[in-house]
Image (tube, rainbow, N blue to C red):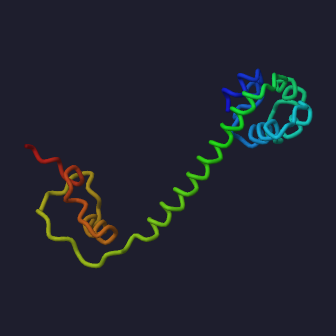
Amino acid sequence: MQKALTQMNIQLTNVISDVVGETGQKIQRAIVAGERNGQVLAAMKNVCIRATADEIAKSLQGNWRAEHLFALKQALDMFDFLGTQLVESDHKIEGQLQSLQVHDGEPAKGKKRGRTRNAPKFDLRTQLFRMCGVDLTRIDGIDSPPRSR
C-alpha cells in the first residue's frame, strides 16, 4: 500500500503514521473507489490524528495513474485477505485449545531427583500430565539437564 501511495506521489505517511490504521484505510479505500478531492478525503480523519485537514489534503495531491490505483487496490485486497486468514486461524486455534482434554490418572513414576533452587514448589509432573496426557518432564531439557551422548 505504501509503495503504491509513493508511486502516486501521495505523502500520506508524513501526516498520519499508520496507513493500515483507521484513517489510512478509509482514505485509501475512498481513493480506490474514485474520490480525488483532498478536502473530502481529509474529512475522513480520526479525531486522534494531530494533523489538520489542510495538511492531510495537501499530502494527498498526487497523480492518479491507473496502474498505481490498480496496485493500491491489489494491496488493499491482499490486506483484507490476510486479515480474513488471521481471523480464521484465530478461530481454529481457539477451537483446538477448547478441545484439550483433561486426563485423569498419574504419570509413570520417574527417577528421584534432588530439588533444584528453581524447581516449582508443586507437583509439576502430575499437573502437566492431567493437562496434556503426557509426562512432559520426561522430555530432554524440561525439568532435567539434557543427556550427554
Residue 63, how many percent across, how many down? 81, 22
Q: Is residue 149 left or right of residue 4?
A: left
Residue 70: image quadrant is: top right
* Residue at x 76%, y 21% (from the top left corner): 9
Q: Quadrant of the C terminus?
A: top left
Residue 102, how many percent across, how many down? 36, 74
Q: Quadrant of the N terminus?
A: top right
In this rendering, the answer to whether 16 lies above or below 95 is above
Residue 2: image quadrant is: top right
* Residue at x 58%, y 55% (from the top left corner): 87
In this rendering, the answer to whether 117 lies above or below 149 is below
Residue 119: image quadrant is: bottom left
* Residue at x 62%, y 42% (from the top left corner): 78
Task: Count numbered badges in the picture.
Answer: 0
Q: Is residue 25 left or right of residue 121?
A: right
Judge by depth and name the residue closer to the eye, 57 or 47: 57
Judge by depth and name the residue closer to the eye, 116 or 100: 100
- Single out the residue that lies furthest toward the left: 149
* Residue at x 54%, y 61% (from the top left corner): 91
- Single out the residue that lies furthest toward the front: 66
Residue 43, how many percent across, how many down? 89, 38
Residue 30, how many percent across, how many down? 82, 40
Judge by depth and name the residue closer to the eye, 74 or 142: 74
